[in-house]
Image (cartoon, rainbow, N blue to C red):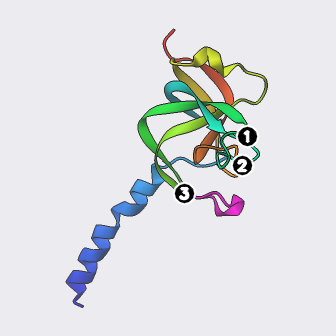
Amino acid sequence: MTLQRLLLMLSLAAPIPVLAASCLHYSGDPITLTGKVKLQTFFGPPNYGENPDTDSRETQAILLLEKPICVEANPKDYEEAEQNQREITLVPQGKENLKVYEGKQIMVQGTLYHAFTGHHHTPVLIEIRHIENAHK
């Protein structure tokens, strides 16, 4: 391989870290996302849809993003990288009634984490620190 080809290959690979730097991170500092809220019902315990007649139902608030996001992996906490995420589960810290935001454009601030139980129905979730209507 000639030196010119090697330099060309390295220069083509250079933009990859720049793209990765634009991805969001799990945990850490709070981030702000905006989107529209939809309530969605999923199968729950005991079998999460394998036995629809006996499985419970779980309704969750899902944030529909206008533009997809990516989240970098966090190997320390076994959180996988995710690309092109357009749906994020909203997770209240307390007894917030997310039904009041159904169908509305909102702005939410919080920390991201990766799904790790059968109750998590999107790969990425956001634990809410602050939520409000985006159009006041």
Left or right: residue 52 versus residue 15 is: right
Tell me which amino acid carries mark 3. Answer: Ala
Q: Nearer the viewer, mark 2 or mark 3?
A: 2
Residue found 71% across the figure and 50% down from its top: 117
Range of residues picked out in magenta: 73-80
Q: Earlier in the sequence, mark 1 or mark 3?
A: 1
Q: Which residue is most to the top?
A: 136
Report the front residue among 60 and 44: 44
Q: Which mark is residue 54?
A: 1
> Dot 2, crowdedness within 10 Å: few (<14), some or many (≥20)?
few
Residue 59 image offset from top left, x and y in percent: 66, 30
Picture quarter containing residue 43?
A: top right
Q: CA distance from mark 2 to mark 3?
A: 27 Å
Q: CA distance from mark 1 to mark 2?
A: 8 Å
Q: Nearer the viewer, mark 1 or mark 3?
A: 1
Residue found 71% across the figure and 29% down from its top: 92
Residue found 57% across the figure and 32% down from its top: 62
Q: Which residue is mark 2?
A: 47
Q: Which mark is residue 19?
A: none
Residue 75 image offset from top left, x and y in percent: 65, 63
Tell me which amino acid carries mark 1. Answer: Thr
Q: Which residue is mark 3?
A: 81
Residue found 51% across the figure and 18% down from its top: 103
Q: Quadrant of the N terminus?
A: bottom left
Tell me which amino acid carries mark 2. Answer: Asn
| Count of numbered labels shown in the rendering | 3
Q: Work out whether 80 lies above or below 64.
A: below
Asked whether residue 71 is drawn in magenta, I would say no
> Dot 3, crowdedness within 10 Å: few (<14), some or many (≥20)?
some
Q: Secondary structure at mark 2?
A: loop
Report the front residue among 131 and 95: 95
